[in-house]
Amino acid sequence: MGGLGAYSASSDSVIKLGVDVRWYKNVYCMAQKLVQYHHDGLNPHVMFIRREHADFVKARIDDDAGKTDREPVGVIIKLSRCTDDNVKFYTYEVWDFERWNYWRCREQLKLLICFCDQANSIISYSGYELPDEEIKLITSYKSLPVIAVNTIHQVAWYPEDYASLRFKVDKEADDWILVEKEYLNSKLQSLIVD
């Protein structure tokens, strides 16, 4: 029996996550990884994924009190590769999915968004939405990210609305003041060398 149906036990999984894909409290290392992918010629595209019909306003107000559903937000990295005989294909790397409800997760994700926005000459990024079921399959390692990614046909949200030095931040602007300060005091900008 082939395909994903063969992976029904919880110990069997089609993808593995490890500490090397955690952006939460590890933004600098993840930014280094993205820059390395660029230097390796892999044309990294950062896909910021949230749940379809996500309610960031409600999640932010809840601030992890548990009175509203968690709003999972995660990162999938699309890398462009080529075989020895010049056949182009893509691979996908699933990074953490964390909850927008918790202020520290929001802050860390906004730092990563800001970095991607600043590094726009070497790293592309966009915001997408997936059905809750697809996110659960990806985060429980029961589906390959390419299956979910292939269902995405357009950008669904704009991460730079929440974190950007290049554009006016329109969403959660009062949070941005602190995140901007954190970004400017970090060494993230020093990683961006074209």
Image: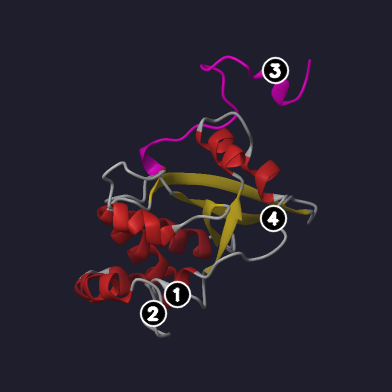
Q: Which residue is drawn at 60% across and 47% down?
A: 92
**Distance between mark 1 and mark 2 Cα atoms:** 5 Å
**In this figure, which residue is indicated by the disc labeled 2?**
169
Mark 2 or mark 3: which comes first in sequence? 3
Please rate how many residues cluster around mark 4, counting C-alpha atoms within 10 Å: few if below 14, some from 14 to 19, many from 20.
few
- Coordinates of residue 118 in the picture (x, y in percent): 41, 77
Which of the two labelled residues, at mark 1 and mark 2, occupies the earlier sequence position? 1
Amino acid, disc 4 = Ile
Circle 2 Cα neighbour tier, 10 Å, few/some/many (<14 / 14–19 / ≥20) = some
Q: What stretch is highlighted in magenta?
A: 1-20
Instruction: Examine the residues drawn in magenta and state their main secondary structure.
Output: loop
Q: Is residue 80 visible?
A: yes
**Is residue 28 among what the camera can see?**
no
As for residue 4 lying within the magenta part, the answer is yes
Q: How far apart are marks 1 and 3 (CA)?
A: 41 Å
For the residues carrying marks 1 and 3, which lies nearer the camera in this image? 1
* Residue 189, percent from left and from top: 32, 74
Residue type indicated by callout 1: Asp
Q: Are marks 1 and 2 in contact (CB under 8 Å)?
A: yes
Residue located beneath label 4 in the image: 152
Which comes before the other along the chain, label 2 or label 4?
A: 4
Q: How far apart are marks 2 and 3 (CA)?
A: 46 Å
Query: Hey, which residue is sitting farthest front in the picture?
Result: 67
Question: Element at badge 1?
Answer: helix
On the image, numbered disc 1 is attached to which residue? 161
| Residue at which label 3 appears | 6
Q: State the SS at label 2.
A: loop
Task: Work out whether 70 lies above or below 100.
Answer: above
Colour option used: secondary structure
Amino acid found under the numbered disc labelled 3: Ala
The three-letter amino acid code for the residue at tag 2 is Val
